Amino acid sequence: MTRADLLALTPDALAALANRGLVKRAAKDLDAGGGPEITVSPDGGIDGAFPDGTTASLPAGAGLEAARCSCAATGTCRHRICLVLAYQRTAAEPEAPEDPEPAAAWSPGSFDDDALARVLGRRALTAARRGLRAGYSAKIRRPTAQDPVAQVELQTCTVRFLVPGELGYVHTDAVAAVRGEVTVLAVWAFRAADERGLEGEEIRLEVGGSARTGGDGLDAALDLAGQVLLEGAAHAGPVLATALGRTAADLGAAGLHWPAAALGDLAEQLAAHHDRRADHDPARVAGLLAEVHARHRAARGGAARSQVLGTEEAADTPLRRVRLAALGCRVGGTPAARTADVYLAHTGTGIVLVLKRRWDVPDGDRLTGADLAGRRVLGSPLRSLAAANVVSESASRSAGRVVRVAAGRIAKTTVTPLGDTWESLPAALLVRDLAAAGRALDALPPRLVRPRVEAELVRVVEIAEVRDIGYHPGAQRLEAVVADAAGTPAVVSADYSPHRPAALDALAGALAAEPRFVSGAVRRDRGGLLIDPFAVLTADGPVVPDLAPGDGTAAFGAPPAAPPDPLAGALDEALAACAEAAHRGLLRLPSGTRERIVRAGGTLERAGLRTSAGALAALTAALAADDPQEMTRAWATAHIRLVTAAELR
């Protein structure tokens, strides 16, 4: 009997089930003549006797986790892997069917509940049904001829079906205690997609749950956002900021995490204005107000609850032994505190997690990124961690993709040099084709209603050439035009911050040194792609600009003059006018601001953006009618449309 399941295991699949080091060592032993003598039983069981006296067996009808070995290893060992590789080399090729089924045609949704219970246990189905009743979101990737692995990304983990038609070879980054439950949820997600006839390689959907749309908690959030808009962020007092914080906490407790986060950020912006802090941004305030309205409208319109309002899943999911590749660091904060976000690519699932740290700033101290570079995080200096490979057995992951390491268990986390890990990142993270990356961004829902997921658009971009590097003195921004191998351009853009004064110097030096890759957040801007950089990989190794030492005294040349873009200019003018209205308050607008809105509408009309111009005209009419409710509705409609148009532009 031929074991098709073992023959289907690729080296990558074996590495996911064990680790790449074991696979390499097993292959080396096999090449050196240290492989086992294999015996195949009639039922498909496989036994192997090694020259050193060790015996291993692979039972029929079971996955690699059921394999047994006489060595002292407690988990998957090199003998088990070597037995699989030896069988693959010696087994006869199975006869191909006359009409082979293409890889893309198989779906994990074909497993029925009886099969799930038989392999994973009834307890796993019982636990999964609780999640189904609450409802959950999933992003599924159907197998293709190029990548035959079916994958489901849940809120707090990723599940991969490594062998078509086999439940014994499922890999997930969740710990063993919940492995069965998340596997069932992943199967049900594929089943729901199949039943709804959803096609395509990548699909987002809502599974189970009810049709609730937010209730009084979300309505209270909308009312508070309306008060801020009518009174103006410049006039909002501490009572309103406190109410925003309290409502955000209530929404979070009710599972409405995304609007809760928006309200929390809005409360922080009001506090920043009250304290005259530099991190207050009127455009940011306007965007948050529009986000609250957009999520409320999308929920009322029947959009997927977890996509626009957040998830009701557990806040954290423990992870099994994970391998992460650092993609750099972003240093930020306030006058009283400094933060560092370390971006870590989960190489097995193709997503990016964020490790967050915060330090208080002593009175009179600057505490820049260079000062933080020597602070120890996970037992290593921050400068080392931000450019390293990390392996941990004590990590957990939140629904927002924030990774945490359990206190007191640092010994189970190792940090090693990055090496060439970026070159072998999954295709979902490594961008070699900027045009394809742009199309992927265009397929996403609007930003105002997307899940508030940390590092959602962080990627590593392969660079073929750096064309121009220049500095905008007014905006204190360094920009460089880079291109991929096909010549498609993108702009690497970084703003100056006193928290990381030497970052622009370090970035310019790295980009001038013929870099191979740059990591950062990738987004659309003015019709092209813009990269907010976190790290640059040069021939001399990784450079993390935010942690670079120095005072930022280097001189830069001016960038080449960009051709005028009337559409972008019209949208920028309109967004600025709406942001000013939200800052001053719709009930307090001076005639100059009203005239600015009218002029912006005319500019949009002349640029051909007639629908956006109509939204500003409706706002102008609502302001003249002096109806507070109609004012807020018209402002929200206009700003949502402008933000979405600018994003698509």
Image (cartoon, helix red, strand yellow):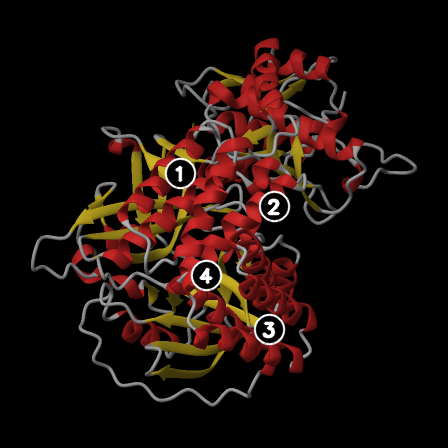
Q: Position of residue 628 (x, y in %)?
A: 51, 54
Q: Nearest to the eye among marks 2 and 4: give it.
A: 4
Q: Quadrant of residue 640?
A: bottom right
Query: 143 or 541: which is nearer to us?
Result: 143
Q: Amino acid at mark 2?
A: Arg
Nearer-N-terminus badge (4/3): 3
Q: Which residue is mark 1?
A: 248
Q: Amino acid at mark 1?
A: Ala
Q: Position of residue 625 (x, y in %)?
A: 57, 62
Nearer-N-terminus badge (2/4): 2
Query: 341 or 269: which is nearer to us?
Result: 269
Q: Is residue 503 left or right of residue 634?
A: left
Q: Which residue is mark 2?
A: 297
Q: Is residue 35 visible?
A: no
Residue at the far right in the pictured view: 98
Q: Amino acid at mark 3?
A: Gly
Q: CA distance from mark 1 to mark 4?
A: 23 Å
SS for tag 1? Answer: helix
Q: Residue at x 63, y 40 (%)?
A: 300
Q: Which residue is mark 3?
A: 527
Assign the N terminus to one quadrant of the image. Answer: top right
Q: Position of residue 568 (x, y in %)?
A: 56, 77
Q: Is residue 394 left or right of residue 145?
A: left
Q: Residues within 10 Å of mark 4 (few under 14, many from 20)?
A: many
Q: Amino acid at mark 4?
A: Leu
Q: Nearest to the eye among marks 1 and 3: give it.
A: 1
Nearer-N-terminus badge (1/3): 1
Q: Position of residue 15 (x, y in %)?
A: 52, 37
Task: Verify CB contact (< 8 Å) between mark 2 and mark 4.
Answer: no
